[in-house]
Image (tube, rainbow, N blue to C red):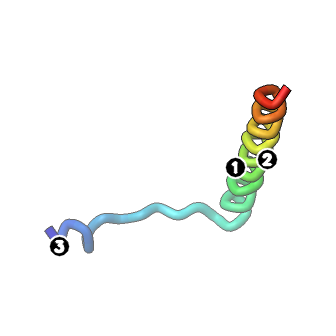
Amino acid sequence: NAQQIKDFEIPYRELKEQKAIANVLSSLDDKIALNQRINDNLILN
């Protein structure tokens, strides 16, 4: 119900840790994109 949602606590990380996490996720996104381009190239050849 609505009260349960209001009472739900969402933890947050310090800005430094948030930036570190964002850097890791960004690197993973880049690797996924690179792998997709490689796969696309293999399919075309």
Residue 10 occupies which quadrant of the picture?
Answer: bottom left
| Residue assigned mark 1 | 25
Relative to 29, is 12 on the left or the right?
left
Q: Amino acid at mark 3?
A: Gln
Question: Sequence-wise, which precedes: disc 2 or disc 3?
Answer: 3
Name which residue lies at 73% across and 61% down. 19
**Residue 30: image tag:** 2
Relative to 18, is 33 on the left or the right?
right
Q: Nearer the viewer, residue 40 or 18?
A: 40
Label 1 vs label 2: CA separation? 9 Å
Label 3 vs label 1: CA separation? 33 Å
Locate the C terminus and report the quarter of the image it occupies: top right
Instruction: Kindly report which numbered mark, 3 or 1, lies closer to the viewer in this rendering.
Output: 1
| Residue assigned mark 3 | 3
Question: Sequence-wise, which precedes: disc 1 or disc 2?
Answer: 1
Name which residue lies at 36% across and 65% down. 9
Q: Amino acid at mark 1?
A: Leu
